[in-house]
Amino acid sequence: MENYSNIIKLHTTTDKVFNALTTEIPLWWTEMFEGLANKQNETFTVRFGESVYKTMQVQELSDNSKVVWQVKNAVIAIPGLKNQTEWIGTTIVWEIIHQENITELQLTHIGLRPGIECYEICTNGWQQFTDSLKLFLETGKGSPFKSNIIFHILKK
């Protein structure tokens, strides 16, 4: 079975893409960000409310060309999802390729495959946040998860 993969074509430079993946994660993925993502072997955690988080270790950083994260811990506490820890042990690879007029960003999530329980939810999530990353890189304003959204929904 194939791992989840997505190619994003961006009208920006490779260094801006690299910076977005290493120092600007809260501007496009989630404002609930802790740790460091810009040094090899450092760890960071992204949260989506109180019940969903992923802790990753930076495995590889190749200037302006590649970023690799190993998922060390994760809980996706979504109602109806039985296996809420499927991300643990998976690897997220971002490859940045300069083309003539664009930068191509290839996302491969090794271990996120059709057949695992969270595949549809997780691939929809990746689409949402890679769209936000593209928006951030091309306009300067992404649409990251905001911590107050979940609490607003719960109060209704």
Image: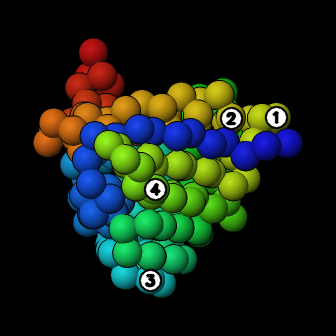
Q: How far across and how far down the image is residue 54, in percent?
A: 50, 57
For image coordinates 54% across by 49% down, the residue present is 107
Q: Nearer the viewer, residue 81 or 44?
A: 44
Answer with left or right where residue 75 lies relative to residue 51: right
Residue that badge 4 annotates: 97
Q: Amino acid at mark 4?
A: Ile
Place residue 25 in its image quadrant.
bottom left
Foreground disc of the pair 2, 3: 3
Circles 2 and 1 in contact, beta carbons < 8 Å:
yes
Mark sitting earlier along the chain (3/1): 3
Q: Is residue 1 above or below residue 32?
A: above
Distance between the Cα atoms at labels 2 and 3? 28 Å
Outermost residue toward the front in this view: 100
| Callout 3: SS | loop
Distance between the Cα atoms at labels 3 and 1? 31 Å
Mark sitting earlier along the chain (4/3): 3
Circles 1 and 4 in contact, beta carbons < 8 Å:
no
Q: Amino acid at mark 1?
A: Gly
Distance between the Cα atoms at labels 1 and 4? 30 Å
Residue that badge 3 annotates: 40
For image coordinates 85% across by 42% down, the residue present is 1
Distance between the Cα atoms at labels 2 and 1? 7 Å
Would you call the spot at circle 1 few (<14 residues within 10 Å), some (14-19), or many (20 or more)? few
